[in-house]
Image (cartoon, rainbow, N blue to C red):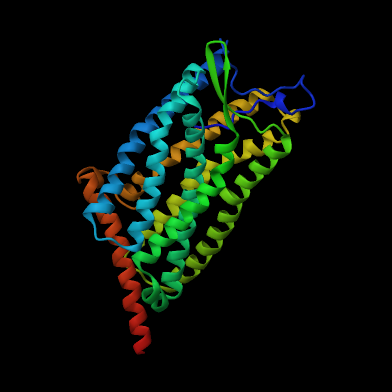
Amino acid sequence: MSVDYIEYEDYTPDNDTELNLTTPGPVLFSRSTSSLTSVLVGVNILTSVVGLGGNFLVIWICGWKMKRSVISVWYISLAVSNFLFCCCLPLEVFYMLTVHWPFGLLLCKLTSSALFLNMYSSVFLLVLICADRCLMVSFPVWSHNHRSVSKAVVLVLLLWLLSAFLTLPSLIYRQTKVHGSVTQCYTDYRLHSRHQVVALTRFIWGFLLPFLAIVVCCSVLALKLRRLTLRSKKPYKVMSALICSFFFCWVPYHTFVLLELDYQNHSLDLLKNGLKVGATLAAVNSFVSPFLYVFIGNDFKQTLKRSLASRIEEAMAEDLRTGALNHSRSKSMEIT
């Protein structure tokens, strides 16, 4: 939801072409723009409400109702990332509706940073989950001897530190400006070169490099799983669905951010609306994960007959059983 709203007149040499994505003061929307805003506001409200409840439930089940494991650490961290973002989303919904930011500079910086912190931490966690699965299948004995909850926690902490570091530009360049009775929350890069560096950094670290790492891990997994006969492949379906949902939700945003770097050769209305839609789809990713834990690989009617909590616990338990199955297979291989 937190689009990188920019005032290009601060550094563009051509002031006749100005992309000001948040026009302060009274705004006259076209019927199509107004309709789009209404749809996006509705989607974001749904994302916030469902995301808060769903991710809190995942945190509660994995954190207090289940035995702590490496896999539960990954999923708790992913749910925490989504939950924190959903906490900030109502402020952005208010800003989209009113085009006025009454919450101050600190919250302006934090709400904008929440989306990018969620982006980095989520995609890095997906890389960890894929790499962990790959090691479990490819090197089951080594994985059993070296995987531990404490090491997983350390990796997650390092991941969050890296994500926070990469989110710093949003904290630095996000500013507020008063226009009469209206306050604007926007991104002030001052120089177009800074905007280019930040946008490319987000694309490379938040999308391209993780995508390549995940493709490699998934390719190795696919080759290994062909040779193994697993009783349940549901954990791998959950992992695949998490990856697909993340990239489908984030591809539009990164596409329009890259197009925005050459904004003089594109329609400003297209970029403005495209960034809004892309950011909203990115926000949707925050409430998709809990449903994937519950519904992937199961008959929908059967799922409805069970409680949500028990279904999440069952989905996570299958992860543990699969890990144990891999370990037992590795032991038999050692004996033979």
Q: Position of residue 231 (x, y in %)?
A: 31, 67
User: Residue, x 38% and y 32% (percent of image)?
Assistant: 48
Position of 74 relative to 172 (above/below):
below
User: Among all residues in the image, which is located at the extreme right?
Assistant: 13
Q: Position of residue 16 (x, y in %)?
A: 77, 19
The number of discs equals 0
Whether residue 287 can be seen here: no
Quarter occupied by the C terminus: bottom left
Whether residue 220 can be seen here: yes
User: Residue, x 21% and y 50% (percent of image)?
Assistant: 310
Q: Which is more toward the observer, 116 or 28?
A: 116
Q: Which is more toward the observer, 60 or 301?
A: 60
Residue 169 found in image quarter: top right
Q: Position of residue 313 (x, y in %)?
A: 25, 54
Q: Position of residue 170 (x, y in %)?
A: 56, 38
Q: Which is more toward the observer, 237 or 195?
A: 195
User: Among all residues in the image, which is located at the extreme bottom?
Assistant: 336
User: Residue, x 42% and y 41% (percent of image)?
Assistant: 286
Residue 83 found in image quarter: top left
User: Residue, x 54% and y 44% (percent of image)?
Assistant: 167
Position of 317 relative to 135 (above/below):
above
Position of 51 relative to 67 (above/below):
above
